[in-house]
Image (cartoon, rainbow, N blue to C red):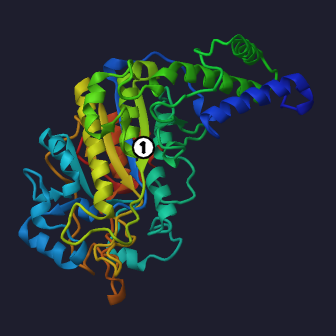
Amino acid sequence: MKAAMNDSMISPARRRWLMGSGATLASALGAGSVGNLLLNARPAHAADYKALVCIFLYGGNDGMNMIVPTDDARYNQYAAVRKSVAIPKESLVPLAGVNYGLHPALSALSGAWADGALAPVFNTGPLVQPITKAQYRAAVANSGVLPDSLFSHSDQQVLWETGSSSSLTRTGWGGRAAETLATVNPVISVAGTARFGLSSLKTPLVLPGPGSTFGAYGLQPTDSWAPLAARKVAIDALYAQGQDVILGDAYTAAQRDAFAMSQRLGALVKTKPGDAAALPVIDAAFASITTAGVVTTPLGNQLYQLAKLIAGNATVQGNRQLFFASMGGFDTHGNQVVTGSPLAGDHATLLKQLGDALAAFHAALKNLGLSNAVTTFTQSDFGRTFAPNNSGGTDHAWGNQHLVLGGAVKGGATYGTYPDLVLGGANDVGLNSWELQGRWIPTTSVDQYAATMLSWFGASDTQLDTVLPNLKNFGAARKLAFL
């Protein structure tokens, strides 16, 4: 049995090498990222390739204005309550075959709807089990019937990302899925170390944006200056040595894998629009949001990076890949809508960035012939109140509308149950006059939403129960039908 690590067992020279080279790589990859690279190299299985792409909309996206009913009765209910933040009916993007329209800022997604590749999922949120308004009103704190800390940004972000009802849950449902399904890579994030990708032993593999160096500066394969090359040879030799201590071996294995991963993915990560190595079919798809070789929105830039990784799935390795991207700013307590100008206001600006980026990503995957292999979906802290506040915005709520996109999606239809739009009604948590704001009790859980995608991804029912512990509380209604 190997001995536990003791500082006295490491020579001063070796300690300096470990600390110096480790600091160099950690500095290049970002704090905590050395541990993100614990990968097992396996051959790709492109014939059975599938990817899930999570896009988290931080701040609490107003799903009530993202997709709006267009039949006269429900639209009139909507407009009467939403008042100054209502989107004019004539400006909505019509969705053929259903009585709903998209916010006009999402017009770029009309092509995805026409392709049958886009589906809204209604009134979704964290739940322990199905719950009625009477059960909600009767529940006491810490009874286990309700999710933790409803209407709180940080807590609800945790519940969505972890697929749990406890804000103390450490691992994300993406990370648990990667671990349970034994994917080659952990969750790959282009938006930092999010809880979604945490598993019991690994953090997400965090990649920088296009044009960035991924790896240790001065120790890249292209760094041919003799002193740097000699240093890299010495580091490789050091990390090839057995340490005779468990922690030392784990550290050197992590460093070896970090160098191997950065050298394998470095060129792919660095490629940006217009580079010689760029794929023209991806550049063409993102052309409408690219200027002078730079994708002009943060989410667009992240999805351009993911399009390259998906196209290069044999280099990334593995026939199952989970990705994480995000955008923020959705906490629209004020200036949400400019009256009479549905394409103005903070929310419209955000939705345009979302719609344009998703449309470009969808086009890129179609160009690559990989649309059927990739499913993209939104998450967000919570929905927002149906009734506006006095600042021209909306406040924190619970159930929300979400979008799922991809060639495998059964588009052209809606899923879940749209709320009844009655303040104080069966879907509203409020009862007294002061609390009638339209904070909808979800009728679809995060567990059911996630299970639908993970089942398509290849998870068995037993594996779904491992990844999503509350799923068993929903009986036979474990999954929706959008995939």
Residue lying farthest to the right in this orientation:
8
Q: Quadrant of residue 224?
A: top right
Q: Quadrant of residue 223?
A: top right
Residue receiving disc 1: 325
Q: Quadrant of residue 391?
A: bottom left
Q: What secondary structure is marked by label 1?
A: strand
Residue visible at 18% across and 63% down in the picture: 68
Q: Is residue 226 left or right of residue 64?
A: right
Q: Position of residue 87 (x, y in %)?
A: 19, 67
Residue visible at 80% across and 21% down in the picture: 243
Q: Position of residue 367 (x, y in %)?
A: 23, 26
Q: Nearer the viewer, residue 480 or 187?
A: 187
- Going by the numbered disc 1, the residue's amino acid type is Ala
Q: Position of residue 322 (x, y in %)?
A: 42, 35
Q: Position of residue 185 (x, y in %)?
A: 50, 29
On the rendered image, what quadrant is the C terminus found in? top left
Tell me if I can see residue 363 in this picture.
yes
Residue visible at 26% across and 63% down in the picture: 344
- Above-or-below relation of 8 to 298: above
Q: Nearer the viewer, residue 420 or 256?
A: 256
Q: Nearer the viewer, residue 322 or 292?
A: 292
- Above-or-below relation of 351 to 423: above
